[in-house]
């Protein structure tokens, strides 16, 4: 059966994947280290929030294989895949569940981090929107969810290694250059997306970061002029 090379992963999807991977590692390192790195941990969390907002928008506006409607399927598709009766490009039905789980747990992590505290000096940019007790509860959830994310990432990496080296289905290089070989009769390159869709998704990401950083909160009161506060 003849094959041809087709584009599966568009550039925005590939950039999202690799940038998110780097930021998640950086978030783990800064969060576990704590101390003076907590400010950087917070900034990284905001960037992750922006990336997730971009991916959610791109899952609607992006090219065909990046859209949720293309790869998110029902239980019957997962069963067919497990029985070897599913053949297609992009995310498999089982991989789609992994993608959704990672996006959901990362989004939960980013949102709880906005109101979290480290019991010392760091507070999230939206800390003042919740009570101290609620912040403490969400901070605990934030710490516990980090280990769930670590577990999902570990399973994700194991699956990639199994497919790449045992099943001889390379999943790594296509996420670098975007292309895969597929049967000529069924191979279809990714369509859709484009600059307008990218700019809309990017605008969603920027808005998410701005809101998450307290852009909608009223400005803090200005400090009193020098000399107006008694020194006694």
Image (cartoon, rainbow, N blue to C red):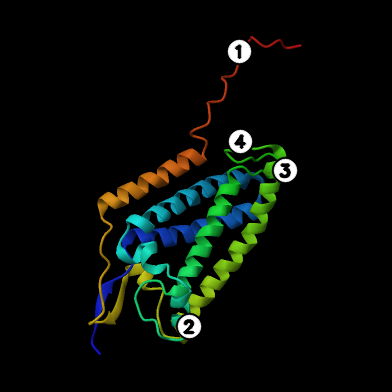
Q: Element at badge 1?
A: loop
Q: CA distance from mark 4 to mark 3?
A: 17 Å
From the image, tell me which residue sits under label 4: 129
Residue 226: numbered disc: 1
Sequence-wise, the earlier of marks 2 and 4 is 2
**Mark 1 and mark 3 in contact (Cβ < 8 Å)?**
no
Extreme residue toward the bottom, this view: 1
Sequence-wise, the earlier of marks 3 and 2 is 2
Q: CA distance from mark 3 to mark 1?
A: 32 Å
Which of label 2 and label 4 is nearer to you?
A: 2
**Mark 2 and mark 1 in contact (Cβ < 8 Å)?**
no
Percent position of residue 181, x then y: 29, 79
Q: Quadrant of residue 89?
A: bottom left
From the image, tell me which residue sits under label 2: 82
Q: CA distance from mark 2 to mark 4?
A: 46 Å
Residue 119: numbered disc: 3
Are there few (<14), some (14-19), or many (20+) residues within 10 Å of tag 1?
few
Are there few (<14), some (14-19), or many (20+) residues within 10 Å of tag 3?
few
Q: Is residue 20 visible?
A: yes
Sequence-wise, the earlier of marks 1 and 4 is 4
Percent position of residue 40, x then y: 56, 46
Question: For the C terminus, which image quadrant?
Answer: top right
Q: Element at badge 4?
A: helix
Q: CA distance from mark 3 to mark 2?
A: 46 Å
Q: Element at badge 2?
A: helix
What residue do we see at 72% from left, 41% from top?
133
Q: As drawn, is 72 to the left or to the right of 129?
A: left
Are there few (<14), some (14-19), or many (20+) residues within 10 Å of tag 2?
few
What residue do we see at 64% from left, 38% from top?
130
Which of label 3 and label 2 is nearer to you?
A: 2
């Amino acid at each position: 059966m003849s094959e041809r090379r087709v584009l599966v992963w568009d550039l925005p999807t590939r950039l999202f994947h690799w940038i998110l991977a780097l930021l998640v590692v950086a978030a783990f390192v800064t969060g576990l280290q704590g101390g003076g790195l907590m400010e950087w941990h917070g900034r990284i969390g905001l960037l992750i929030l922006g990336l997730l907002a971009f991916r959610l928008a791109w899952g609607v506006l992006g090219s065909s294989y990046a859209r949720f409607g293309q790869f998110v399927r029902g239980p019957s598709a997962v069963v067919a895949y497990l029985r070897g009766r599913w053949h297609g490009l992009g995310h498999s039905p089982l991989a789609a569940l992994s993608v959704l789980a990672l996006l959901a747990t990362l989004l939960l992590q980013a949102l709880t981090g906005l109101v979290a505290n480290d019991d010392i000096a760091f507070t999230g940019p939206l800390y003042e929107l919740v009570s101290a007790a609620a912040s403490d509860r969400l901070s605990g959830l934030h710490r516990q969810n980090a280990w769930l994310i670590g577990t999902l990432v570990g399973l994700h990496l194991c699956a990639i290694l199994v497919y790449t080296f045992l099943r001889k289905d390379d999943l790594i290089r296509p996420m670098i250059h975007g292309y895969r070989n597929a049967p000529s009769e069924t191979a279809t390159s990714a369509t859709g997306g484009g600059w307008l869709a990218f700019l809309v998704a990017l605008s969603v990401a920027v808005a998410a970061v701005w809101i998450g950083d307290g852009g909608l909160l009223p400005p803090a009161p200005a400090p009193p002029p020098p000399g107006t506060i008694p020194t006694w």
